[in-house]
Amino acid sequence: MSDVKRLPGDGCRHHINKRCLYDEHLNPGYAEGFRCRVLLRWEIAFDEFLERADAFNIEQDAVPDLWGRKFERMARQAFDCEKYEFAGGEAPACAQVYDGLCLLALPQCEGRCRHFFLVDED
């Protein structure tokens, strides 16, 4: 007889911190509401920066340094996210960010479900 696996959550491939990644695994990046708002703002700021740099014909060699300074200022500012929880490490250093997603934006794991998929135990 095989081992009995505990359901749900920590044994499921779609489970992380009591949240369900099933919808994200199904269509990665489709639900913008799951994305970290801080990272989204930084991406938009970077795109706008590149457009302005192009419009002003800034030398390509100067772009990384200019962006680096702008990003340092942005990273020091308040993140404007009520869900932010400092975790240390790389920016945005939030305990609720996983692979660019805000874990608190994901649906809660409801328990046993038809999407349960055993984590590979290699």
Image (spheres, rainbow, N blue to C red):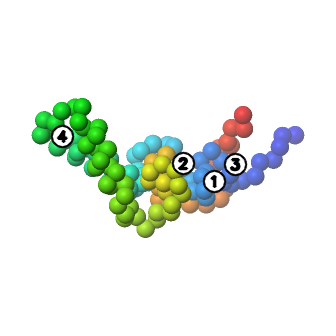
What residue sits right under mark 3 in the picture?
A: 11
Disc 4 marks a residue whose amino acid type is Ala
Do callouts 2 and 1 mark residues in contact (Cβ within 8 Å)?
A: yes
Disc 2 marks a residue whose amino acid type is Tyr
Name the secondary structure under disc 3. Answer: helix
Residue at x 60%, y 56% (from the top left corner): 17
State which mark lies toward you, 1 or 4. Answer: 4
Residue 23 in view (yes/no)? no
- Tell me: 65 left or right of 117: left
State which mark lies toward you, 2 or 3. Answer: 3
Disc 1 marks a residue whose amino acid type is Cys
The 10 Å Cα crowd at callout 1, few under 14, some 14 to 19, many 20 or more, is few
Residue at x 46%, y 63% (from the top left corner): 84
State which mark lies toward you, 2 or 1. Answer: 2
What residue sits right under mark 4 in the picture?
A: 53
* Cα separation between marks 2 and 1: 11 Å
Name the residue at the bottom extreme.
Answer: 82
What residue sits right under mark 2 in the picture?
A: 22
Name the secondary structure under disc 4. Answer: helix
- Tell me: 117 left or right of 72: right
Whole-percent x and y of residue 70? 28, 49
Name the secondary structure under disc 2. Answer: helix
Which mark identifies residue 113? 1
* Cα separation between marks 3 and 1: 12 Å
The 10 Å Cα crowd at callout 2, few under 14, some 14 to 19, many 20 or more, is some
Give 32 or 53, whichever is nearer the viewer: 53
Do callouts 1 and 4 mark residues in contact (Cβ within 8 Å)?
A: no
Lower position in the chain sequence, tag 3 or tag 1: 3
Whole-percent x and y of residue 35? 42, 52
Residue at x 68%, y 52% (from the top left corner): 10
The 10 Å Cα crowd at callout 3, few under 14, some 14 to 19, many 20 or more, is some
Name the residue at the left extreme.
Answer: 56
